[in-house]
Image (cartoon, grey):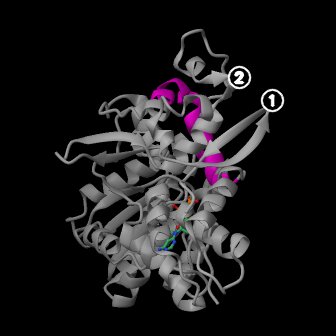
Amino acid sequence: MREFNTFGPVNPTEHYHVNRVAVKADLRARIDKGRYLTLNAARQTGKTTLFREVVAELEAGGAYFAILLDFSALRGFSGARLYERLAVDLAVQAGRLGVPAPAPLRDHGDFLDWLRLCVRQRGQRGVLIIDEFDAVQEEALTNLLSLLRAMYLARYDPLYPALHSVILVGVRDIPSLLHGTQSPFNIADSFVVPYFTAAEVADLLGQHTVETGQPFAADVVAAITRETEGQLFLVNRLGQLLTTEIVPGRDRAITNRDLAYALSLLLSENNTHFASILSKATPHRSVLLPMLLYGEQTSDFLAPTTQDLLMYGVLRAVEDAQHLRFARIACPIYRKLLLMRLARPELDPPVNGSVANRYLTGGVLDFDEHLAANPLLAEHGPVFEQTVAGKAVRTYLVAAA
Ligand SMILES: Nc1ncnc2c1ncn2[C@@H]1O[C@H](COP(=O)(O)OP(=O)(O)OP(=O)(O)O)[C@@H](O)[C@H]1O
Ligand SMILES: [Mg+2]
């Protein structure tokens, strides 16, 4: 029996898995065109799962070979030690590809020569994929980017065999890594991994129903899509809570009331996904509070704060009916999480008259008091009550069925 996965890449034999045909085709098309690109998305958005599947399909087709590296193991290394560690990983890839390991690997120059050797020996299109490329320190990264740029620019010269495509996978984009200095990788295209569509959420949850016979009541799937907007980890985590902790028996359907309970459990847990969102959101609390409380949006995509919050997935760029782009809190679950966490005085004592102060009672965000003033919260019925600093606080989630 498969299950919902919430830790790391998805394995379709063990986990419910959405075959993201359209997204894979899009990435595949960029690779076919010979692009050198970054694949950026916030934590737990399906980056690793996506490129692994695309690479497996490419290699199975016979026209491509792939070199797969993960720089998270190089974090903290620099200079000669970094290249010693990298050499170990390259030797593994060399074994897989049947090419000689790099000897020696003193610096990025030797790395470039080895990449060219791979292309020459294999005689196929080469794709280099570096997961967590943003883990290495800035100097090594700049050298790597210069090396890839040199390879890209000489790609039509038969004397210098070049990789057909390069994909750098990570959370941080290159301008932010290089602090705005001119990037040597300005040849790169950027691929953004989208959230699940409503149909993909229904596909994932439907797999549980097919395998166990346990249905989700008609409006529950729509409510999960509304609350998560398709954020990949959140959809899986709600599926997991509902089917393992809240309704572990398979003899009844999952209802909206169960979902309300699952949301309250989710919002009180200390998972790494929320920790990452909170750590990126907290420094920008004053920008976020009006968005959280009044549903404000921004179209100022050039503002460094907007860029940062988009990059880390706190905000999401969406289009209105007129196709105008704007950024807003990425999904209702983040809004609830951030409301509960950011509107608390211990982070930054509110100044009289500030947005935060108007919504705090006894130092705690009071959902009851401000329900009338806040249509965003009025959509939701009360679900759970907790005592914070000696005061009962109610949290409003989705309306119970
Ligand atoms: N194709 C898929 N079908 C179902 N769930 C998926 C799929 N891809 C990703 N997920 C969900 O997203 C989670 C994260 O996937 P993955 O590790 O591929 O993302 P990532 O962006 O590389 O994460 P990280 O930033 O932690 O490296 C998985 O644990 C799973 O819950
Ligand atoms: Mg990953």
**Nearer-the-camera pick, 381 or 313:** 381
Q: Nearer the viewer, residue 40 or 400?
A: 400
Secondary element at tag 2: loop
Residues packed near mark 2 inside 10 Å, few (<14), some (14 to 19) or many (20 plus): some
Q: First in sequence: mark 2 or mark 1?
A: 2
Q: Position of residue 223 (x, y in %)?
A: 47, 62
Q: Which residue is mark 2?
A: 363
Label the magenta part by its dominant secondary structure. helix
Inspect the image, locate mark 1, and give the three-letter code of the amino acid beneath it: Ala
Report the amino acid beneath label 2.
Gly
Q: In which quadrant is the C terminus drawn?
A: bottom right
Residue at image mark 1: 389
Q: Position of residue 369 (x, y in %)?
A: 60, 28
Residue numbers of the magenta segment = 271-290
Task: Name the residue rendered at 55%, 36% in the picture.
Answer: 281
Q: Position of residue 396 (x, y in %)?
A: 59, 45
Number of numbered callouts drawn: 2
**Placement of 148 over or under 388, stated as above or below:** below
